[in-house]
Image: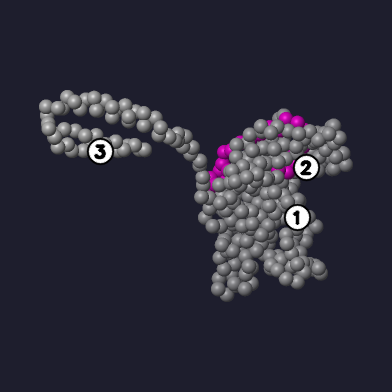
Amino acid sequence: MMRRLKSKTITTPHVRITTMSSESHSEAGRQFPAIGIVILMLTVSLTQIHWTHLADEKVVEQTSEQPWSPYEQPWGQYGGTPTRNGSMPTHDAQTGTMLTIDDPVVNWVALDDGIGSDAYGSIIGNFSKSLAVTPGAIQRCAPFGLFAVVLHESTSTSSTKLSLFSGDDADLAWQVDLGDTKAARSTPVLADVDLDGTFEIIVSYDTDSSLQVDVWSPELTCDESGWQSGGHSNELMWSWTSTDYRIGITSPHFQTRQSNHLSVTQPLLADLELDGQPELLLTVVDSTTDDPHIISLPLGANAPTVNWDVTLDRGTHPSDPAWAQLDAQTSVVVATTIDENSGNMWIWRIDGSTGSNDWGRVALSGT
């Protein structure tokens, strides 16, 4: 006797199984052996399926920010760039964006007062976005917005002046008094500290009792009568002070030491964290222990707290810091120290982001 059967299909990865079941309820008991066979076949078949193990997802932090460019300003710090690379840019005597000066002449002279500037360098800044000019004075008031930024002593007092001189004719365009300082030999640096599109001037200097870092946000005004160079004392954005450190130390050379000349380090502006905002680097000396240090200060609209502070436990005199980018995530700060008594020298490499000194130091033999 024939019974009509209907088919039932079970589909799994890599296996297709068809079973037959009777419509007669009386033969339901006969389905159990068949179901057992199906389960067995499924078990065997599934063991042949290749399962791919997915490793735990690793989260990689990425930023859309581009590293800060030191070329935002024509010459924004000592040495031009944080690498302190002294190689010449591409130039040509006849063509290109940068020509060769083969017959130099003196355009103008500023500070022709017999005193001049104590700083080891001066910088060139573009302050066109900080410049307010009346329509009738556009041509005479620095049409290109370039200014020389100079630290110098006052001719009438013992104080130090921070001045901007017009790049066209050396007219004094802006000036503030820093007060009584030791010889200000650290070159100013330029940065858009508060990210408002205008540039601030950062100066570092010693007083008799402390190390001082000032950030000035100059507002330049010029009309038909000339520059309004005075009255800018309220343009100080913030100051950072340390009574523990100084950037000037007695020179290790006998002749210069006799004249009370101080060896003064130069500040460094570099994007240590590669996040688009530079930090300020200073190599300093502890006033109590005489140990050299490297410190990192973040730059923002308000007075900072130190990012990191590394003690350099060899040597007496630190060099200026320099900076290098190793890869897309890593930058380092490089400096040297020397011992004024033995003449020994050490090289230091500090992680820019964390201040880690895992690399340690390398002694240069024969120095």
Q: Is residue 296 left or right of residue 289?
A: left
Residue 53: x, y in percent? 45, 34
CA gap, disc 2 and disc 3: 90 Å
> Of label 2 and label 3, which has the lower sequence position?
3
Q: Is residue 220 left or right of residue 116?
A: left
Quadrant that contains the N terminus: top left
Residue picked out by circle 1: 87
Residue 284: x, y in percent? 70, 38
Amino acid type at mark 2:
Ser
Quadrant that contains the C terminus: top right
Label placed on residue 175:
none
Which region shows up in magenta? 298-321
Residue at horizontal 53%, vertical 53%? 195
Residue picked out by circle 3: 9
Residue at horizontal 63%, vertical 43%? 331
Q: Secondary structure at mark 1?
A: loop
Depth check: 40 or 333 in front? Answer: 40
Residue at horizontal 75%, vertical 41%? 319
Residue picked out by circle 2: 263
Q: Secondary structure at mark 3?
A: strand
**Number of marks:** 3
Is residue 233 at least partly visible in the picture? no
